[in-house]
Image (spheres, coloured by chain):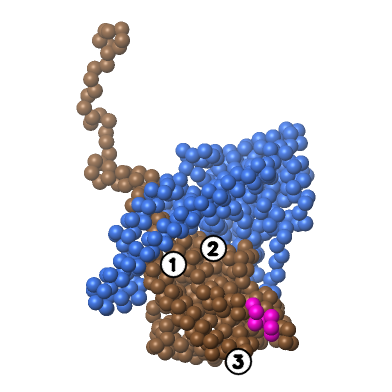
Chain colours: A blue, B brown
Amino acid sequence: MSKIHEKVLSKHKSEAERQVAASRHREPEASIIYNTKHTSKLNVLKSIADAMIVGDESNQNDPNFKAMKRDSFWVTQLHFIVFKILLISVYFVFGIFRYFQYQYNKMRLRVLNIIYNPTSTPQLIRQDVLKLSKVPKRLAAILDMKPIGEVGGGVKGIVNDASEIVCWTVSAGIKHLMLYDFDGVLKTNVQSLRGEIAEKLSLYFGPTDTPNFAIRIPHLNKVYYNGADDENYNAKSEKVIIEISLLSNRDGRETIVDLTRTMSELCLSHDLELSDITMKLIDTELTQLVGHEPDLLLYFGPALDLQGFPPWHIRLTEFHWEADNDQVSYLVFIRGLQKYSTCKINVGK
Amino acid sequence: MTTISNKWHTTLTDRIYHPIINFKHSIYGQFNVQKQNLFIWIINLWLVSWLNRQLQSIMINIIKTGRVPEHISFIMDGNRTYAKNLNMPIKKGHEAGGITLLSLVYACKRMGVRCVSAYAFSIENFNRPKDEVDTLNNLFADKLDEFAIRAKDFQDPLYGAKIKIVGDATMIGDEMKRRIKRVEKITQDGEDFILYICYPYTSRNDIYHAVQRSVEQTLNNEISKDEITIKHFTENMYLESFSNRCDLLVRTSGHKRLSDYMLWQTHENATIDFHSGLWPDFTFIKLYLKLIKLSLYMTVQNYYETTFLSSEQVLRKKAEYYNKWRGNINLSSLPEPPPTISIVGRKS
C-alpha cells in the first residue's frame, strides 16, 4: 500500500527539521562521562554535598517515606541522617573504584587503538574482516555532535566521523549503513557530507577508482548520488557500492505516530478497514519510511545510550560499544564486527 | 542417580555457607543432608538467613535516602542453562528463576521503586517444545496465586502490591485467562507498587496494539485524529502510565540485544544493563550495586540540570530579559559617540 507511504511523506515535507536538543534528557552515565565538566572530581563532590544538604525531592512521593513520617519526628530524623551518611560513604567508595576503573579502561583503549590501526588502508581492513565467519548485512551507528570548542567537535567533526565510518564499511564489504544522530545535523548538512565522503573515499581508494555511493534521507524521500551533482551520472547503469541512510530523532516515535494518524484518516474515509491493519502492514510501511532493521548497532560513546533510535528497528539488533570510550575509532568498529561474528540468534528458543 | 544428587549437594552446600546466602537453594539441598547434621544445619541456616535479612534491610534503608529509579525491568534469561549446569530438570530452573524474581520484587518495593516489569514469556516462546510450554504455564499460574495471597496478607512485605498481566490476550487459553482475571481482581486496590508481568509479550506487538487502539478510538469518535500525539499513543500501550520510560533494564546471561522487549520504553533515556551471569544467580546484592551506581549518576546529573543552565538556556533567558525590559534597541536612539579624529590630526 504505497498510498499510506505517500501520505505520510507529504506530511513530512511540510515541516522543517526541528532542533530538540534543549529538551533532551540523556542517559545518566553517558552524559556524565561525556561532559568533561561533569567528570571533574571536585564537581562530583559538590553535587553529592548538595544532594545531602538540600535533599532529594524525588523521595517525597515515595509511600515508604510518608510512612516514616508517621513515627516520632526526632527518631525519623536521626534514622534519616545516619542512613544518609552511610549512603554518602557508599557513594565515595564507589566513586574511588569508578575512578580507577575509568583510568584502566582508558589505558586499555589506548593499547587497543595501537593494535587496531587501519591507517587509511582498505587492504588492512579487509584482512581483519576476512578472519571473521560472518559480517552483518546492515550496519547502524549512532554519532554524537561534540561541543564546538572541543577537538573533533561541531558540524565539521561529526561529518568527518561519519565519512570515516563510511570508508571502513566500504572496505569491510558491507553494503548498507545507517547513520543516526539525534538532531539531524547530518541531514541538514548533507551537501558537505557528500563532499567529505567523496574526498575520504578517494584518499582510501585513489582518485580514479572512487566507489560510487548513495545517500538516502528516508524522511524526505530523497536520494543523492556521489560527491557532486553530475549531469551524466546514471544511477541505474553504474553500480552503487554502499547505500547510506541518514536518520534522526524524527524517524523514531514521531514517525510511528504519523503513521497511526494517516491510518486513522484512511479508516475514516473508508479507504482502509480496521481489520486491514496488521503487524505485517505496519512493518512494511515502517521499512519503507525508515529502512530495514540493522543487524549490528555501534555506539561511539562511553555507555550505551540509544538516544531515541527508531524503536521498531532495534528488535533483534546486537549492540556494541566500548566502556568509557568517547571517540569514533576503528577499534569500536572492528571489535563490534568480531562480537557479531561469534553471536548466535535463536528466536524464542 | 546417587552421583547426580551428590553433585547437587556439594555445589549447593558451598553456596549455603557463603555469607550472603540465598534461601532458595535450601529447597534443593535439604534432602541430601545427613540426619545427624540436620539440627546444626537448620540452626546455621536460620542464623545466616537472619543475618542476611538484617543486612539487606540496612542496605535498603541506605539506598532509600538517595535517588532510586521509578521503573525497573528485567529480562529473565538463563533459567534453562542454570538447570543444565546443576544437572536438574529444566522445570527446576524456571522455579528458581521465579523465586529470584519474587525476592527482587520484594526488595524493589521496599526501596521505593514504583513499578517493576518482567519478561515472563515471549510470543516467540510458543515455538518451544509443547511440554515445556505447559510446565511454564502451570508454574506461572501457581506463582500468580502465591503472589495474590501474599499481596493480601498485611504481614507480608508484598502487601499492597498490584499485579497486572499484560500482553496479547488472544494467545492464551480460557482457563488461564480466568485465573489471571481473578488474581488481577484480588490485587486491584494496590496503590504503592505495581508489578507488570509480560505474558505473552513482544514489543512490536505492543506498538501494533497501540496503533490499533488509537485508530479504533478515532473511529469511535472518542478523539479526533489530531489528538493522536506521542503522549496519547504511549498511554494506549500495555504498561499504561509506565509506558513512557523505563529507567533501568537488566538483561542477564550476556546477550547484548533487546530481543523484542521494551523497545518503546528503552530507546530513549533508559539505562540498559547487560549482566553476564544467569538469571537465578542474579541476587539482591548484584541488583543493589547497579542501583547504587545509577543512583550516584542520577544525583550528579540532577545537580547539573537544576544548578547550571546550558548555554542555550542562558541565551534564551537573555533574550527573554531583553524582550521584557528593554524592547528593541534603535541605533539612532543611542547617544552620539565622541568625534572621530584621524591620525593625520585634522578634524574631518
SS assignment at label 2: strand
Q: Quadrant of the C terminus of chain B?
A: top left
What is the C-alpha distance between the residues marked 1 and 3?
A: 46 Å
* Residue that badge 1 annotates: B69
Pointer 3: what residue?
B35
N-terminal of the pair, mark 1 or mark 3, is 3
Q: Is residue B234 magenta?
A: no
Mark 1 belongs to which amino acid?
Answer: Pro
Is residue A70 or residue A267 the one in the foreground?
Answer: A70
- Judged by depth in the image, the label closer to the viewer, 3 or 2, is 3
Locate residue A300, reporting x and y percent.
58, 50
Q: Which stretch is magenta?
A: B5-11
Q: Are marks 1 and 2 on the same chain?
A: yes
| Image disc number at residue B272 | 2
Tell me the CA gap for discs 1 and 2: 13 Å
Q: Is residue B150 left or right of residue A237?
A: left
Tell me if label 1 and label 2 are in contact, CB under 8 Å.
Answer: no
Q: Chain of mark 2?
A: B
Residue B202: x %, y % from top left: 60, 73
What kind of residue is marked 2?
Ile
